[in-house]
Image (spheres, rainbow, N blue to C red):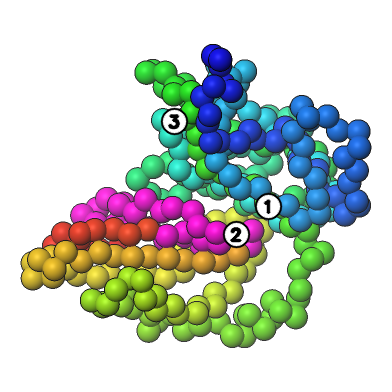
Amino acid sequence: EVGPAAWLCESSRLPAKIVQTPKPWSTDKLSSTDHLVAGRSIWVRDRFGFPPDEVADMEHKIELEVSEPCVFRATTHHSDGVDVFIALTKKDETQRACKTFKHPGPVPRQTIFCMLQPGTYTLTFFADYPLGGLHPCSDFFAQIALRPTALANEDKTQQCVAAASDLSSLQVQRSLALTTTPQWKSIKIPVTFESTPATVSVWSSGITITDEDALQRLFLRLVLHSDYISSDLRFQVRFEGKYIADTQVTSHGYADMIGPLDPGTYY
């Protein structure tokens, strides 16, 4: 057999339509080619690829039907062979409904985060076709989420704000213990919603590696968990003026292990 089915690619196909609705959704009238996701609170995350019929244009459009005021987030992550970008517009319009942000790092990764009012929108994933062609199984990791504001618990929000952690004493822990013995530290960081989305620095610190330290072949292990829709906290490491952390998506956050570390200061 020759064709996509013979390649045994591990990536999924992006949905063609996402329906956010508080009402039960019937699938009786759907066919296997509808590629639809429906629900009230939605979180889609997987490795996706441009299907053969879209490779020429390197563009995929998802129609979003929103029935309630919602917090919306869409992000791109690791991609194989191409840099993937995203844009959100109202249906049949060209002006963007929400701003797209680029995350600091060695490769382009983007986020759209905003409040959506009821209506119909178009979420577009697009990329430039590489000069050397595209491998049949090239894919990228992406996440799309919608959560109605009606599901927010104001009491718990106030409790979180009141119990905010003091980050001034937080430092990178130096240890020669095995990395299989994690030393977790619970941190509560209130998230304040503003009229316009923005990237905010929550905490930063530096660690200096001496020549003697480098002889021990030290590694820097970073793991961060957060609620994807409301905060999506990330980390990045800068060394000699360049970003070096290649963050990997975990079940509820990001992780990376960098090393062996060279002498110098890491931020």
Observer able to see residue 210: no
Q: Secondary structure at mark 1?
A: strand
Q: Amino acid at mark 1?
A: Trp
Give neighbour class at mark 1: few <14, some 14-19, many 20+ (Cα, 10 Å).
some
Residue type at numbered disc 3: Val
Tags 1 and 2 touching, CB below 8 Å:
yes
Question: Residue at the spot x=42%, y=60% of the render?
Answer: 255
- Using the numbered discs, state the Cα–Cα distance from disc 2 to disc 3 in whole angstroms: 24 Å
Q: Quadrant of residue 191?
A: bottom right
Give the answer, above or below, for where 59 lies relative to 261.
Answer: above
Position of 126 with respect to 61 (left or right) is left
Nearer to the camera, 110 or 245: 245
Query: Which image quarter holds the N terminus?
Result: top right
Which is in the foreground here, disc 1 or disc 2? 1
Q: Look at 60% across and 36% down and name the residue there.
A: 12
Identify the mark nearer the N-term, 2 or 3. Answer: 3
- Numbered mark located on residue 82 in the image: 3
N-term mark: 1 or 3: 1
Residue receiving disc 2: 228
